[in-house]
């Protein structure tokens, strides 16, 4: 692979990471709304089923992220090979510096810490928190004033 191809793939990796984070945010937000209106008052088996489903979705996303992480490591290794051969330009050097200076590791650590925190919070909200659903008075028909 040329350096240009490697840098292009690294940018694709960052896009995949951001897409994964946005999907996680969407799934968690939707689940919290469901907890508030439906799941929080459900029987234990229904809450176990809902939590299992959300867990499955989030674990699948994490598996994709772990696979992408392995690919990322291979791309970084290729940049190291290019540097050793004296063929690395500024763009490749910048990407390699991110990996070597801990920026990439910090992003991974924050992702894992965030997911552990999310799972703990969802477990608490599903099984321990006592939900009192929000009740919003909605009038479908307008009232006529006499």
Image: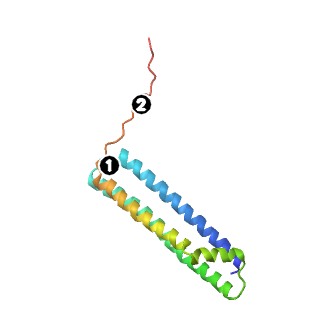
Q: Earlier in the sequence, mark 1 or mark 2?
A: 1
Q: Say whether residue 89 is left or right of residue 14.
A: right
Residue 21: x percent and y percent?
A: 51, 61
Judging depth in this view, the residue of 52 and 33 nearest the camera is 33
Q: Say whether residue 36 is left or right of residue 74.
A: left
- In the orientation shown, which residue stands out farthest toward the top? 146
Judging depth in this view, the residue of 123 and 51 nearest the camera is 123
| Residue at numbered disc 2 | 138
| Residue at numbered disc 1 | 40
Compared to 107, does 26 lie above or below? Answer: above
Q: Say whether residue 44 is left or right of residue 102.
A: left
Residue at 65% in and 81% down: 79
Residue at 30% in and 49% down: 42
- Asked if one can make out residue 94 in the rendered structure from this viewpoint, the answer is yes
Residue at 68% in and 81% down: 1
Residue 126: x percent and y percent?
A: 32, 54
Judging depth in this view, the residue of 31 and 78 nearest the camera is 78
Q: Residues within 10 Å of mark 2 (few under 14, many from 20)?
A: few
- Asked if one can make out residue 6 in the rendered structure from this viewpoint, the answer is no
Q: Residues within 10 Å of mark 1 (few under 14, many from 20)?
A: many
């Amino acid at each position: 692979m040329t350096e240009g191809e490697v840098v292009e793939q690294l940018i694709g990796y960052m896009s995949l990471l951001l897409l994964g984070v946005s999907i996680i945010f969407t799934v968690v937000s939707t689940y919290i709304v469901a907890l508030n209106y439906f799941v929080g008052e459900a029987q234990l088996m229904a809450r176990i089923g809902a939590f299992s489903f959300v867990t499955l979705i989030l674990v699948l996303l994490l598996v994709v992220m772990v696979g992408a992480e392995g690919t990322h490591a291979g791309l970084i290794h290729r940049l190291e090979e290019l540097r050793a051969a004296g063929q690395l330009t500024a763009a490749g050097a910048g990407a390699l510096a991110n990996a070597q200076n801990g920026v990439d590791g910090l992003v991974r650590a924050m992702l894992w810490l965030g997911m552990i925190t999310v799972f703990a919070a969802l477990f608490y909200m599903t099984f321990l928190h006592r939900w009192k659903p929000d009740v919003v008075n909605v009038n479908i028909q307008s009232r006529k004033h006499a």
